[in-house]
Amino acid sequence: MKTTQDTVQIRPESEALRKRLSETLASMPAGSRRKFKVMTSSVSTNQGAGKVRTYRLLDQTGVRHFIMDTHAQIPSGDQKWIVWSHSGDGQNLVDFATKAKIRKTDKRLLVLEDKGNEAERSKVLRRLLNTLSAPDYHSRIFQAGIVEVEGKLTLGVCSANLEWLRIPVSDILALHRLSLTELEAYEIDSDGSWLYWPEVDVHLGWEQLKQLCDKDAALKAKQRSANFNQRYGAAIRGLRKKHALRQSDIDGLGSRQVSRIESGHCRANRNALSHLAKAHAMAVNDYMGALAGELDES
């Protein structure tokens, strides 16, 4: 059966954004580029049967032009807006949101601080395209930030679907003892898979963070994953012992972390698997294949 493919339509509302978007798309693999169509008008041009997702990109110039354009069209449907804004643009943003008929910002609007850094803007555009090209784009992390809400430090995370999660840092066991400076020293994977704090070696993905907001989802996920984590950890332990390695022999991972992985208390992320594979003198794919063999034997 032939499957349909979603199309992501992107309309940059200024020449500077159009140029930057074209350069970013040109540097991507052809397979990823095919999922995108750069629009020159607000009218959908999709001819396929798949779902169309439309993202409109605006900078300060684009916002002003949009407000002043008496012929600006606001098509119905799944229209999302990403705006780069300066600190003094408050009234323009209000006028823009009114004209664009944005009453609720969640899943509709994301405002980014424009610091005039072209390299940073290119990085953000690339991450946007990478996350949007993933089948599970709705659970890929596009942006994040640490803010204060009602006197509590809060981690805000935005998906490529422009959906927000907001979690008090005090509810995140791996982070709750960190200072503000340490909390802000995170990285976002280029494809939005993780938020990563390198100083404390903590990876958090969208689904993990969502479970902190939704206790029912957390319970179901825990029930699904607990048994697998234990079996996978046992496979890691069995393979290590076959290679006559000690937990302390895994460069890049502490003995305590290896122990937690092997006991099933935490899952081996990509970084951990890379270190484990290297300690076993294997490529990551070969190491994961060997683990699959261990799982089959258990």
Image (cartoon, rainbow, N blue to C red):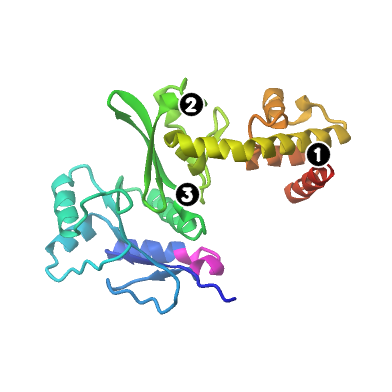
Relative vertical location of residue 289 with respect to residue 50 in this rendering, above or below: above
Looking at this rendering, what residue extends furthest in the top direction? 177
- Circle 2 packing at 10 Å, graded few (<14), some (14-19), many (20+), is some
What's the CA distance linking mark 1 and mark 2? 31 Å
Q: Nearer the viewer, mark 2 or mark 3?
A: 3
Q: Which residues are magenta?
A: 25-33
What's the CA distance linking mark 2 and mark 3? 21 Å
Name the amino acid type tagged 3. Ser
Which residue is found at the position 56% from the left and 39% from the top?
A: 221
Q: How many marks?
A: 3
Q: Position of residue 192 (x, y in %)?
A: 49, 48
Name the amino acid type tagged 2. Leu
Residue 275, by quadrant, is top right
Residue bearing the label numbered 1: 280
Residue bearing the label numbered 3: 139
Callout 1: SS: loop
Relative vertical location of residue 214 with respect to residue 37 in this rendering, above or below: above
